[in-house]
Amino acid sequence: MEISLEGKVAVVTGSGPNIGSGIALALARYGAKVACNDLDGAAAQKSVERIERNGGTAIAIPGDVTDEQQVQAYLGRVIEEFGQIDIVVNNAAVLGGRGVLDESAEFFSRAVQVAAMGNFLNTKHAGRHMAERGIRGSIVAISSSNGWSGTAGVIAYAFHKGGVNNFVRAAAMDLAPYGIRVNSFTPTAPTPDNPDLIAEQGPGGVLDRPRTNGLGGPTGDEPWRRPSRWAGDRMPLVPMGTTGTPTDIGHCMAWMCSDYARLITGCDFVVDGGARAKNFAYAPAAPSDLAGPVPVIPLEQVLDPTS
């Protein structure tokens, strides 16, 4: 079975530089033409350049996913440039934040707005385009393990990712009569593999460098404060020893958006080495005792962005 997205056109929101860029690259490497959106135009262009140096075709479509006129404008540009839209990946989100005792109303509102309107507006207008033209397309929303279970220190993120999960199920019912599929994908803190990002911040990800103020760290020095989570050395909690990379996500995403998945809608896909599946009392083996997964099948053809 050879997965091919040849002839398809994909839109990826929030396309830089980690998960979004990895998904955009994967869709391009499997044959799709890709339009890379981000609020930061430079980030969108970086994603385009990564695709192009790996032999793909892409354009940058910067814009605010919460602004309906901007969404219609950049989707219109994709249609004008590539002729149609077959795939939409709603990845745009506001990361980080604080816990419920300390989060600001402004940050909470903006984070929820980006997720809610980003998923709604791009699904609405791309979905109408598909329905009007008889395109039986695929729409994927990026969820998070935080949308399925509780994590300290990210109350806004947890709230809007939980909303994404039921948006997917409801939108899948709305669009099923048109043959348009709507699913979600749940990543769990993947390790970055974008050469540009690694050059900027070094190898490793959030599991190697926990956010002291984001994921459960104290935000004040009042005497009544209690720590949200254990801050000492912890054993690895992922059954297979790794949550994977954006490349692992990309391979799954390409299949989800292909015609092989023609009857899959309203579902969630998880690629995380078993992190979400485990029981709370799970006691992992030592890292040296884990076989680990098979080697990742690379998507990056040019590892040195300066070459």
Image: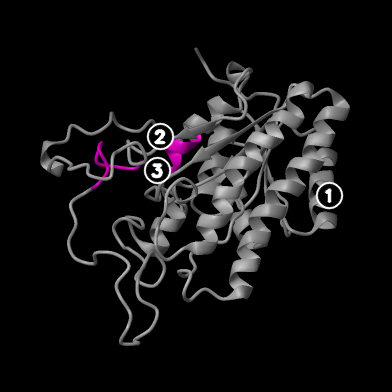
| Distance CA(mark 1)–CA(mark 3) | 32 Å
Q: Residues within 10 Å of mark 3 (few under 14, many from 20)?
A: many
Q: Secondary structure at mark 2?
A: loop
- Which is in the foreground here, disc 3 or disc 2? 3
Instruction: Return the x and y of residue 238 as percentages of the image width and height.
Output: 27, 43
**What span is colored magenta in the figure?**
237-250
131 vs 24: above or below: above
Q: Which residue is mark 1?
A: 72
Q: Looking at the picture, which amino acid does disc 1 mark?
A: Gln
Indicate whether residue 285 is drawn in magenta: no
Compared across the picture, whether 259 is left or right of 232 comes to right
Residue 302 image offset from top left, x and y in percent = 45, 42
Report if the CB atoms under discs 1 and 3 are less than 8 Å apart: no
Left or right: 42 as drawn, with respect to 100: right
User: In terms of secondary structure, where does tag 3 sit?
Assistant: loop
The circle drawn on residue 245 is 3
Q: Which one is nearer the viewer's eye here, 79 or 170?
A: 170
Residue at x 63% of width, y 74% of height: 106
Of label 1 and label 3, which has the lower sequence position?
1
Distance in Å between CA atoms under marks 3 and 2: 10 Å
Q: Nearer the viewer, residue 34 or 305?
A: 34
State if disc 2 and disc 3 touch (CB < 8 Å).
no
Report the amino acid beneath label 2: Pro
Is residue 240 in the magenta section?
yes
Name the residue that disc number 2 marks: 298
Extreme residue in the top direction? 1
Residue 173 x/y as whole percent: 71, 29
Task: Indicate whether 212 appears above or below 261.
Answer: below
